Amino acid sequence: QVQLVESGGGLVQAGGSLRLSCVVSGSILRINDMAWYRQAPGKQREVVASITSGGTTNYADSMTGRATISRDNAKNTVALQMNSLKPEDTAVYYCNAALTIFDGGRARTGKYWGQGTQVTVSS
């Protein structure tokens, strides 16, 4: 059973910072790309930042300069540091990982999601 569990969300004032964390657990052969997505009420889920297994990062234009994604391959974790938060950053933030697992006698790669953590930025 593979699990992605996020933590670190909460309520913060505009201009503040939050650090989100996600830990991946279960019978995993390999963790490939990891990413953070967010979904605001009435809007589609969108990618916030991503990081490859080699450490290459990409950010949404809206978060460039305000967010840093990092991962610890030894601990199977990915983190998202967000600074200078704005009310429009309010959303549920989801951890996403492309995982290779052993299933039915062979390796299989798929995308897995966490349950989400709420981030609310007050003005």
Image: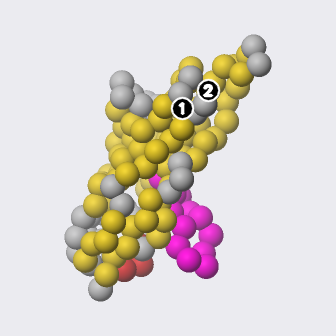
> Looking at the image, can residue 103 be seen?
yes
- Whether residue 105 sits left or right of residue 56 in the image: it is right
Residue 103 vs residue 86: left or right?
right
Categorize mark 1 by other alpha carbons within 10 Å: few (<14), some (14-19), many (20+). some
- At x 31%, y 71%, the residue is 11
Secondary structure under the numbered disc 2 in the rendered image: strand
SS for dot 1: strand
**Closer to the camera in the image, 56 or 104:** 104
Label 1 and label 2: CA atoms lie apart by: 8 Å
| Residue appearing at x 49%, y 49% in the figure | 95
> Which sits earlier in the primary sequence, circle 1 or circle 2?
1
Quadrant for the N terminus in the image: top right
Residue occupying the point 53% across, 73% down: 40
Amino acid carrying label 1: it is Asn
Specify the amino acid type for callout 2.
Thr
Which residue, as the protein is rendered here, is positioned at the far top? 105
Image coordinates for residue 30, horizontal then vertical, percent:
54, 24
Query: Residue farthest to the right?
Result: 104
Residue 50 shown in magenta: no
Which residue is label 1 attached to? 32
The magenta stretch is 36-48
Is residue 83 positioned above or below 23 on the image?
A: below
Q: Position of residue 56 (x, y in %)?
A: 42, 39
User: Which residue corresponds to mark 2?
Assistant: 100
Q: Nearer the viewer, residue 1 or 68?
A: 1
Quarter of the image holding residue 15?
bottom left
Q: Are marks 1 and 2 in contact (CB under 8 Å)?
A: yes
